[in-house]
Image (cartoon, helix red, strand yellow):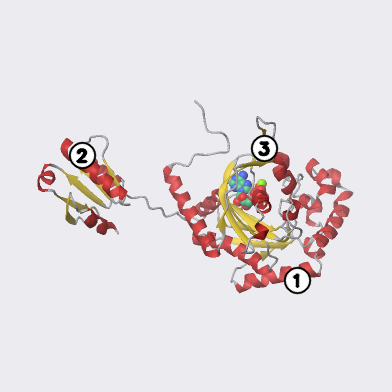
Amino acid sequence: MIQIPRGTKDLLPEETAKWQVIEKVIRDTCDVFQYKEIRTPIFEHTDLFTRSVGDTTDIVQKEMYTFTDRGDRSLTLRPEGTASVVRSYVENKMFGWVNQPVKLYYLGPMFRYERQQAGRYRQFVQFGIEAIGSNDPAIDAEVMALAMSVYKKMGLEKVKLVLNSLGDAESRNAHKEALIQHFEGRIGEFCSDCQSRLTKNPLRILDCKKDRDHELMATAPKLPDYLNEDSKNYFEKVQAYLNELDIPFELDPNLVRGLDYYNHTAFEIMSEGEGFGSITTLAGGGRYNGLVSELGGPDDTPGIGFAMSVERLLLALEAEGKAVQTIENVSFYIAAMDEESKVAAVKLTHNLRVNGISAETDYLNRKVKAQMKSADRLEATYAIIIGETEMETGIAKAKNLQTGESVEFSLADGLNELKKLVS
Ligand code: ATP
Ligand code: MG
């Protein structure tokens, strides 16, 4: 028997119903915040990710699903969304669009070769947004507000926003020098990844999962101490806007994002739900003012965004004991007593459906009693039984299964009455 690949899963209908609720909350939220959906391909040229995500990151070094196609091109299943969105922004010259900044969202599967554990899959679904073309600290606050708004609408209470600033290029460079000096002498005590990170991107050492308990980590130079005036000002304005929007946050000077292209605002949203386990990050994001030009777009085009996975959102709901309210019941169940009325039942079912009303009937030629059991199991609002009498008189009854009340209607032209019952 062939089984599902490791790190992936099937969503069976009951589970899918929950996903659809979450997807609707996401789409509705993006709609009111005025972010429009973009759909980019599932695979891209490998270079896109090595260039934008950065070749010192875990994603590029260990996690990509890369393959050569029959035309000898190196392609990669997308491990994240920002690179593709920015590629598309540049390729479609969105910097020329009338409405600026360009505000986009995506919702779809991402692929990373990771060790499977709770909240960590090889195929998972990310929802993310990107606001490209604005350097206004108000939009940093908006981006975080949107993410928090999704969690809030889903009913999560134990989520916190954690914030830091990586500063501009000048600040980052000053910090980088300090980091190199700090770790240089004892870099031999660190993992091989960190050793190669030292000169390429020492900031990533702070994000290392293997060496996180090394004593030099706690004493490492902190970003906030290296922010220049401009960067400090920017960060203060972001915080002021968050306060105005009543969005609580915590500062964490050790928060760095795994990806190379971030600067200024960096944030994560964490769950404090009991039983959420060791992975507490629900979403991560930040500003990436260098990425657009890195991918061939106009210089100094600013951008900011975040990404969250639906899988971790569901885990957080579970940890807080919150259920996702799904509606799955059918409006009408139509039962038939004999072969002749069966044809009428199938017709009525079809007529209801093409008029936008959910309906179900029996396809196993069961006795009426068994059919009514099905109606119960499907939580039908109304049941209709068609038999000899109904066929003779042309009048049938729709019985409300909750109240027991019945309403008569004409089989030939009673559709409007039935519509009224469930509208
Ligand atoms: P982590 O430190 O947990 O590996 P990351 O830094 O790799 O996270 P990002 O690349 O910032 O994560 O992705 C943003 C969000 O996507 C994460 O906060 C998380 O919600 C989700 N995510 C990342 N990897 C996975 C995965 N393998 N399975 C499920 N969700 C994931
Ligand atoms: Mg990761």
Q: Residues within 10 Å of mark 1 (few under 14, many from 20)?
A: few
| Residue 266 appears in the figure | no
Across and down, in percent, residue 59 comes to: 69, 44
Q: Write down the residue under mark 2.
A: 343
Ligand 1 under 8 Å from disc 2 Cβ: no
**What number is the disc on residue 10?**
none
Q: Amino acid at mark 2?
A: Val
Label 2 sits on a secondary structure element that is helix
Q: Nearer the viewer, residue 79 or 115?
A: 79
Residue identified by numbered label 1: 233
Indicate the quadrant containing the C terminus: top left, top right, bottom left or bottom right: bottom left
Q: Earlier in the sequence, mark 2 or mark 3?
A: 3
| Residue corresponding to mark 3 | 75
Label 3 crowd bin: few (<14), some (14–19), many (20+), radius 10 Å? some
Disc 1 residue type (three-letter):
Asn
Badge 3 vs badge 1, beta-carbon distance below 8 Å: no
Residue 184 on image: x %, y % = 88, 49
Q: Earlier in the sequence, mark 2 or mark 1?
A: 1
